[in-house]
Amino acid sequence: MKITGIKPNMGLVADKPYYDRGRMEPLTFAVLKGLTPPEHEWVLYDDRFEAIPYDEATDLVTINTEIYTARRAYEIADRFRARGVKVALGGFHTTMIPEESRAHADAIVIGDAEPVWAQLLDDATHNRLQSTYQGCAGGTGSLDDIRTDWSIFAGKSYLPVRLTQFSRGCINQCEYCATGNIYRKSHRCRPVSQVIRELAHNGAKLVFFVDDNIVADKPQATQLFQALKALNIRWFGQADLSFATDPAFMDLMLESGCVGLVVGFESLDQGNLSQMKKNCNLGFESYDPLVKRIRQSGLLTWAAFLLGYDNDTPETIMATCDWALSKKFAFAAFNILMPYPGTPFYDRMRQEDRLLYNGRWWLHDDYRFGMTGFQPRHCSADELAQACLDARLRHNTIPQIFRRSLDRKTHLRSFWSLATYFAYNPLFRDELLKKHGMKLGYRGQERPVNASALPAYLGNASNPSPSSK
């Protein structure tokens, strides 16, 4: 049986398919390929830079859905099904709102796919595909059988970093977060020896752990970091701030090859943190001592902020940007709070009649990337969108990028750190500007199969202005 995996794109920029220069490997498909018996043939098409060959013969199409790619995923699925090809949809969005995905698929997978993947393939082979496959729910089930087969990415162009996963789930259950509300405070780890063996065999020297919180299970993380030392690699990951409270643990992370972390600060306001139930951040009176320790360690920090909770105003958002600039973070993401279906935040906004776009912004014709999906408490939706855009623009001006680069403790610590800083800051700046105002989905347009992969609009980063409905 021939299996076609598809990673959907988000949508259209300047009425042409978005070309994502900052794309990373879609790890999901490497994991599924690793679980697939050798008698099956696999092919992957990444819609973010490749055309989808709808006329190519295949037996089963598998599509990973996320909320910003859901509309495009449904477009692709509908077109394959119109040709008589069976389609299976899975991923976070399908898990959070299965009935919506069911209308566009012959089969949907709810939860983690690993426990049901073999059954789905057998059913597809024998033409008895079921409508629903219930994978691991609420974070149950073992990760011991995961095998990652990165060969599926051969011949494709991605950022030069290998993606892998050590743990899955999150011990928190923040109001806004899809991950926390799927895994319900559960957190599981793969065997350390298995992860180390895979990475050693692959030989990659720069690795990104996609774990939502790689330090959530400190004893298991300690074992992983001890074992990583023998590989002599550099790695990035995502972690909550607890790692910065333990100097010995931080030292071990550095010894293991950790060079940077994505850290969710989310808000400087305790009331906002309490409302979002960001419990792991509530114990700190100030982030300043923790940031000082992180900078002294030399780690590159990607600071993530979530803007739009009830105590936020355009003024507090700009104050957050000022604070971030003062800390000279390598990167910062000023994310608009968005109501994801299936989360308590979405339910609260619905109860308070604050949802916009009929509560389905990800499918609405008028929604554009960067707009707000709900009515904020202290400003208009347009004002919130503009404030978030202003923060992004201010943090990513060319002078600010150069000013932040002069931090001797982090970016000037080594040639590698400085090179990494200047390799990615202009890239991320251009991509965030290019994406703003994007239409979700292709809306009848397709990337020509024989066209050059590089579109004419690449690099067009003119200053956009937000609009909402």
Image (spheres, helix red, strand yellow):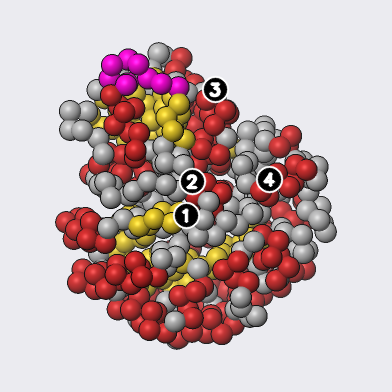
Above or below: residue 146 compared with residue 174:
above
Q: Which of marks 1 and 4 is in front?
A: 1
Q: Nearer the viewer, residue 7 or 446?
A: 7
Q: Name the residue under label 4.
A: 346
Label 3 – label 2 distance at C-alpha? 24 Å
**Please, what secondary structure does the residue beneath circle 4 have?**
helix
- State the residue at coordinates (19%, 72%): 230
Residue located 53% across and 29% down the image: 101
Nearer the N terminus, badge 3 or badge 4? 3
Give percent across and percent down for residue 135: 41, 37
**Which of the two discs, 2 and 4, labels the residue nearer the N terminus?**
2
What is the distance, in whole Å, between disc 2 and disc 4 at their CAs?
19 Å
User: Which residue is labeled 2 in the image?
Assistant: 138
**Amino acid marked by disc 1:** Ser
Q: Which amino acid does label 4 sit on?
A: Tyr
Location of residue 357 with respect to 158 vertically, above or below? above
**Earlier along the polypeptide chain: callout 3 or callout 2?**
3
**Numbered badge on residue 253:** none
Is residue 441 among what the camera can see? no
Q: In which quarter of the image is residue 132?
A: top left
